[in-house]
Amino acid sequence: MEIKQSTDTTVAGMLKKSLFPHQAAWIKPVIIFIMMLLLLIPLAFIRSLVNDRERYQRTAEASIMEPVGGEPVIEGLVLAVPYDELVEYTDSSGKVIKKGKKTDYILTVPETYNLVTQIDPYRLSRGIFTVPVFNGDLAVTASFSGFQFSQFNIAEKNIRYKDAVLILGIKDKKTLTAYPALYGNGKPLLEALTVPAGASPFRNAVYYMMSEDVVRSGFSIEGSVSIQGGKSLCIVPLAADNSFAVQSTWSAPSFSGGWLPKNRTLDDSGFTADWRISGLSTVFPRSWRAQDFDLAKDTDVYDEYDGYTAKSTSEFRSSPETVKIGFITPINHYSQVKRCITYALLFLAVPFLAIFLCELWSAVRIHPIQYFLIGIADVLFYLLLLSFSEHVAFNLSYLIATAGVCTVVGFYTAAIFKQIRWGVLLTAVQAVSYFLLFGILQSEDYALLIGSIGIFCVVALLMFLTRRVDWYSSRFASVHTHQEDADRGTPQRAITGKLSSGDIE
């Protein structure tokens, strides 16, 4: 006997068009899944590239920020009054072998501390990377009550009022663009000729000489501090009563630290914000011995500001003992690209499933290499997005990458199926999937909900469209042909792939 070459609706025709002539129908989806896993390799390289670009960005930012002192931290005013303490030195047996004097300091914070400033940032660039930097003048006022020492059990004769100094703390002296001009009770304060060892609780400070009479009676401070810096401004609320007011032309600020503004206004022209902070809500004592409390060791004021990257020890709050005003860019395109890559596997599955369904309905045989090429095009979407987002707005970059990938995949699909309608269909599927991904990126609060609904709809649609597929069949026929056979009353042999006597001559 001789087997005839039959039409596409016969078993022989279906065998010619079957995806795998010698394998079961479910093998093709398995190979597709393996290819999806292989595509995770180039995706990993792209993620690594994003990390590299972020490192380049941080290096460029550091090279811009270092000359201006980094992110300014205004640590406040403290009065330091020295006193002499009798110290006994003993040997290993506890016998006193020597007596001497040791100098320590009593530190006192202001009763009130007010700061008002106008900050107008501008951008500096290094290559393609930009950083907001600024100059500003801080109007500072503070008041100190008369010096109190009774709680320390120190004899007044041991207190050296004439050597008292007022200390202005600042993270980096490069931040200062001029010597801070401060006035005590209306009189200009002079810079201390020597730096008293062990007096300052700050890493960097400016010292002013104080007269004995104002230290005893109390005094007020006013003046101006001219600063420069970039990315953010931080203020430490050291006093018993703190009041800060900041105004800026920057339209996208961030407020963080331990306290949010009491009042704020934001619009396209900039923002204003003010804080009122009680000393009861801070960790700083009203007065203390210098040896008993260290700002760097006993608080996390410095945790976030060592260098130019965040190093906060707090898992949930960034340096809670400061008020921080950040001058941020509205969208961090690197973090957005990373989020896209996080969902990449799901959005690689969508076009593969679409092509697989097109095979079911058209009975056109698609080689795994053709699947792989379409997958590579989808992977290149993330590389295009990364590349363009460094030069144009992220939303425009997303549109360009989407248009490019959808166009290429659409034309390629139309060519391999030899019908334009399949290319149009896959282009539409790609566009809808990228639109869904864009919605997830834009709606962080609802990203999980949108993604879950999207996945559920895809799975439900896949179940509906493959409900007629006989996955146990040793031959993979098209759903379209099965439906035609059912409409004509053709026996199940066309679906199961068994030969009948009518096919053999």
Image (cartoon, rainbow, N blue to C red):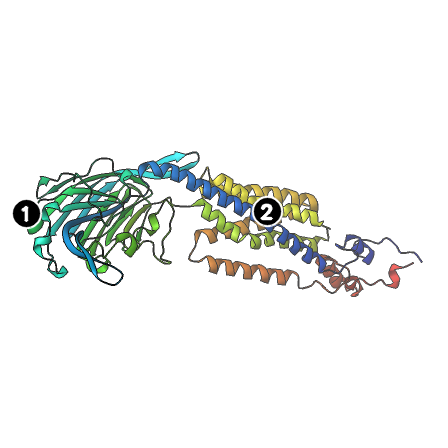
Q: Quadrant of the N terminus?
A: bottom right
Residue at figure coordinates x 80%, y 53% from the top left: 16
Percent coordinates x, y for residue 488 in the rendering: 76, 62
- Residue 42: mark: 2
Q: Is residue 254 something that shows in the picture?
A: yes
Q: Does label 1 or label 2 sit earlier along the sequence?
A: 2
Q: Is residue 146 something that shows in the picture?
A: no
Mark closer to the observer (1, 2): 1
Q: Nearer the viewer, residue 184 or 155?
A: 155
Amino acid at dot 2: Pro
Horizontal side of residue 468 vs 59, given as left or right: right
Q: In which quarter of the image is the C terminus?
A: bottom right
Horizontal side of residue 350 vs 451, given as left or right: right
**CB-based contact (under 8 Å), mark 1 and mark 2:** no
How many other residues sit within 10 Å of disc 2, few (<14), some (14-19) or many (≥20)?
A: some
Q: Mark 1 points at which residue?
A: 213
Q: Does residue 501 lie above or below 202 as drawn?
A: below
